[in-house]
Amino acid sequence: MHVSYGVPLAPLTTLGIGGPASSLAELHDPAEFPEFVREMRHSPTPPVCLGKGSNVLVGDRGCDLPVLRIATRGIRIMGAMDDGRVLVEVQAGHSLWELVTELIDEGLVGMEMLAGIPGTTGATPVQNVGAYGQEVSDTLRSLEVWDWKLGRRAVLDANACALGHRTSVFKKSRRWTVLSLLFALCRDELSTPVTYRSVADELDVPLGSRVPPAEAAEAVLTVRRRKGMVLDSGEPDRRSTGSVFFSPEVGDPMATKLRRLGAPVSRFPDGSTRVSASWLIRQAGFGLNAPLTHGVRISSVHYTLVADDGASAAGFREAVGIVLRQVLHRTGVLLTPEIDFIGE
C-alpha cells in the first residue's frame, strides 16, 4: 500500500479546494487492507475515507487525520436469488458511473437512472445516493465493512444502514469503512418506469414508460449536462458537489403554500414531503452565474454553487451561509448542507 505525506487534497475533489493531508494511504488492492489496519493500530481515531471527492469540502489548512483513499475496482456477477434478481458484488472504489454502464451491458436494470453521478460505489450508501426516481436503497442488499469500534470485518444488511433521504448510519460517523457492496438487480430489456418529467420529455415518452436501459441512461446524461452536472464534460460549471443542500422537508401547511407558488413539492420514498432546494434558491432572488464570494458563484445553468479559480474552503462555506440565510429570510424554509466537511 502506498502512503504519502503532505499530499494536496484539492486535486482529489471535484471542487478542487482545500489543503493537504498529513498522510494519505491509497488502497488499490483489497488484500492490502489488513496492512492499513495494522498501520492504524496506534491511531486514536478511525481514518477519513475518500473516494472521488465528489461530495466533500476540504478545509484550507487540510486534514490532520489519516486519510484513506479507496481506489479498489471490480465487479462480480453472482447467482440469481429465488425471486429472480441477480446478485452483483462491487468493490468500494469502483466508479459508480462505470458500474451503471457495465450493468446495462449485462442486461441488468435498477440503477440506470444513476448514470453520470460522479464518485465511487462505496460512497453511495453514505448518503443513499439517488437521482431521477432511483436510490441506492432500491437495489442495495448488504455491505462488507471494517468496524473500527470492534476491530473486525462485518457484513451489514441494507436494512441496518438506516438509509433515508441522503442519509444513513455512515453519514456522520467514521466507525465503518465500506469495503464491498452487494446489489440485487433485475434482468430485463426495459428500464424501471421513468418518473421524472425532464427525463420523460427528453425521451419523448409519457411518465411511467419503460424504455431500453441504455436510452434511459443517455436521457439522464443529457438532462444532467444541461445542468452542468456531468463532471467530465469540460464545462465551466463542473467544479461543484452537485447538490450542495438537501431537499428540505416541509410540513403540510408549508407544502400547500409552496405548491400554490409553483414549487416542485414531492413525496419521497422515506415518506417525507420535500421541496426542491434549487427552486428555493431561485425564489430567494439568486440569479444564474451570480457571484457570492471570491471564486464562488451560482452555476450559470443550475441553481447550485460552483467554484472558480481563487476559491477557498472558507469562501465556499461563507457562500453556503449566504444562500442559507437568504433562502430562510425570503421563503421561510431552512436549508441544510449535505456536503461532508474534512478538516477545520
Image: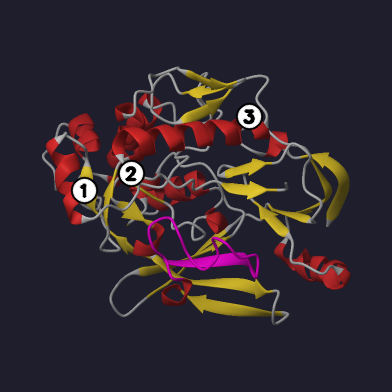
Dot 3 lies on which element?
A: helix
Counting from the top left corner in percent of width and height, residue 283 is at 29, 29
140 or 238, which is in the foreground?
238
Main secondary structure of the magenta stretch: loop
Residue drawn 42% across and 66% down?
A: 163
* Residue 137 horizontal side relative to residue 253, left or right: right
Residue drawn 46% across and 24% down?
A: 298
- Dot 1 surroundings within 10 Å: few (below 14), some, or many (20 or more)? some
What's the residue type where badge 1 is placed? Met
* Residue 272 horizontal side relative to residue 169, left or right: left
Residue stretch in magenta: 162-183
Counting from the top left corner in percent of width and height, residue 46 is at 74, 66
**Residue corresponding to mark 3:** 315
* Residue 151 horizontal side relative to residue 104, left or right: right
**Residue corresponding to mark 2:** 333
Dot 1 lies on which element?
A: helix
Residue 94 within the magenta-colored segment of the rendering: no
Residue drawn 54% across and 30% down?
A: 319
Distance (Cα) linking label 2 and label 3: 23 Å
Above or below residue 71? Residue 233 is above
